[in-house]
Image (cartoon, grey):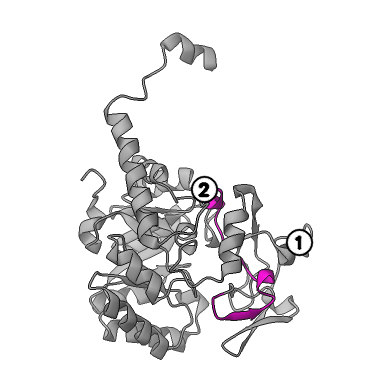
Amino acid sequence: MPLRTPICDILQCHYPILQAGMGGVARAELVAAVSTAGAYGFLGMVREAPDFIAAQIDAVRAETDRPFGVNLIPAATEPSLFRAELDVCLARRVHSICFFWSVDAEAVARAKAGGCIVLYQVGSVKDAIAAEAAGADIIIAQGFEAGGHVRGAVSSLVLLPQVAAAVGCPVVASGGFATGRSLVAALSLGGQGIHCGTAFLATTESFAHDCHKNALLAAGSEDTVYTDAFSINWPPHSPVRVIRNAATDQLGGQLVGHDPDDLWWEQVATDSGRPIYRYSTDSPLRTTCGNVDELALFGGQCCGMVTTIVPAARRINDIIREAEATLHQFENNLYPALPAEQLVGSL
């Protein structure tokens, strides 16, 4: 199996494909489907109540005996709630924890002491080094192309090989990866797998609202917007990548430089009785009602390569089949080198 890399042994999965722990979207149905299909799923449990996290962990285990993890974000969670979130994960003996945003060494230490494998998603070489020093087992290097919250400022093509060279632990590529060809590219750049959000948002099992999924399918890569306007509920200056919609159009040319304290909290939707505000970090879910198309429609630049809504197992199978076909082409020299004179002529 040429696509089996060391992270498959660490995470006990068949394929080096990780499903991003998208808040709200990555719930038990999606995670169970991904892990059952041989990839590795993460519950997106950012700022969720401990009882809800426990119920979601139990729901995944009721559907599959495959390992999976939980995604938490210390910097975006009130400290006492974060401690309670991590406590319930450790009490439920989850297989792994994935942290994101600024490196929290104390959180890594607690998770490791509780027996968890720790993954840390970062956006720079500096943070990758800090995460490894804190004890992270796997680094997820997120490029600027990524959907949702974007930590760094350089593309995956540039960031991934630098991070792989800077740390000794395995590195997984994130941001712009949704196909088998992109998996092969990640491996060639020093990664041991890919971490996909957009590709799994557009699946039948994701908890995203249909309007979000359909907007993703209709969008081209140039239809995403990088902005920090969707900042209600998050620390200031936390940029995101979303699909362009009425809310982003209202920003005019001012896409960055927003502070959540200065935003007008206008309720445009509800979710299970909870008010949802324009420019909050809440994306529309199956349970969201109201002007759902004015909320944050998170999506990466790879949306131009995601053109169907399919079961998660089909998405994984398509990625693996294309990656194997691509490797086969290389192995059988089906990409012959150009004659030297043509290479010189093209410079």
* Residue to which mark 2 is pinned: 305
Residue 241: image location, x then y, percent: 59, 60
Q: Whole-percent x and y of residue 193?
A: 33, 52
At 39% from the left and 84% from the top, the residue drawn is: 53
Q: Along the horizontal axis of the image, is 346 left or right of 180?
A: right
Mark 2 and mark 1 residues within 8 Å of each other at the beta carbon? no
Q: Report helix, strand or loop for mark 2.
A: helix
Up-down relation of residue 317 to residue 250 (above or below): above
| Image quadrant containing the C terminus | top right
Could you say where residue 46 lies in the image, as x and y percent from the top left?
47, 77
Circle 1 is placed at which residue position? 249
Q: Is residue 51 magenta?
A: no
Residue depicted at x 69% and y 75%: 291
Q: What residue range appears in magenta?
A: 285-304
- Label 2, label 1: how far apart the Cα atoms are: 24 Å
Q: Is residue 167 something that shows in the picture?
A: yes
Q: The N terminus is located in which quarter?
A: top left
Residue 135 in view here: no
Residue ranking furthest to the top: 341
Q: Secondary structure at mark 1?
A: helix
Q: Measuring 56% from the left and 59% from the top, which residue is drawn there?
A: 299
In this rendering, the label closer to the viewer, 2 or 1: 2
User: What percent of the width, then of the height, locates residue 339?
Assistant: 41, 12
- The residue type indicated by label 2 comes to Met
Question: 214 above or below 335?
Answer: below
Q: Amino acid at mark 1?
A: Asp
**Badge 2 density bin: few <14, some 14–19, many ≥20, Cα 10 Å:** some
Reading the chain from its start, which is encountered first: label 2 or label 1? 1
Tell me which residue sits at (33%, 45%) in the image. Answer: 321
